[in-house]
Image (tube, helix red, strand yellow):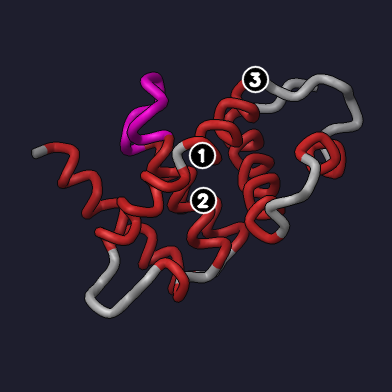
Amino acid sequence: MSLNRHQIREEAFQVLFALQTDSDADLATIYQSIPHHDRKEIPAYLQTLVEGVSEHQGELDQEISSLLASGWTIGRLAKPDLVILRLALFEMQYVDDVPTAVAINEALELTKTFSNDKSRKFINGALGKFEQQLEK
């Protein structure tokens, strides 16, 4: 069974969330703990997302900080929201074949699954602000 990109993004969220929770966790163990991975091969796009977000986390976090309202810090964000923002910003900047609108829509879909409506509105606003900055 081949996963579509939405399913891969959900898995990337799960892997990145697990790494956020325990930065010393073994990546191979995390991959194998995801329900779809009863097979041995990890989808290439899943690896692209996980490795890309991990490698660029410092830059992504700086960009997220710049999108926050005055007085807010990354530390105040719910962990699922932070992971979703990192994923979306990574795709918007580093994945050429993902249009910005798709990255934003996918982030909102992840928020429906892994967070709440208040977070969905926040993430939509933050990513919309970032999209405007990209267009300038």
Local crowd at mark 2 within 10 Å, few (<14), some, or many (≥20)? some
Q: CA distance from mark 2 to mark 3?
A: 21 Å
Q: Is residue 57 above or below residue 67?
A: above
Name the residue at the bottom extreme.
71
State the extent of the magenta-drawn residues as a range: 91-101
Q: Is residue 61 found left or right of 24 in the rendered image?
A: left
Instruction: Give the class, few, some or many, for how many residues have Cα within 10 Å of label 1's Cα (few <14, many ≥20).
Output: many
Residue at coordinates 69% horizontally, 49% vertically from top-left? 14
Say whether residue 106 is visible: no
Query: Which quadrant: the C terminus?
Result: top left
Q: Compared with residue 14, is residue 114 higher up or lower down, i.e. above or below?
A: below
The image quarter containing residue 36 is: top right
As drawn, the label of residue 61 is: none
Q: Mark on residue 44?
A: 3
Q: Secondary structure at mark 1?
A: helix
Are the residues at dot 2 and dot 3 in contact (C-beta closer than 8 Å)?
Answer: no
Disc 2 marks which residue? 109
Q: Which residue is mark 1?
A: 53
Q: Secondary structure at mark 2?
A: helix
Q: Residue at x 81, y 34 (%)?
A: 28
Q: Nearer the observer, disc 1 or disc 2? A: 1
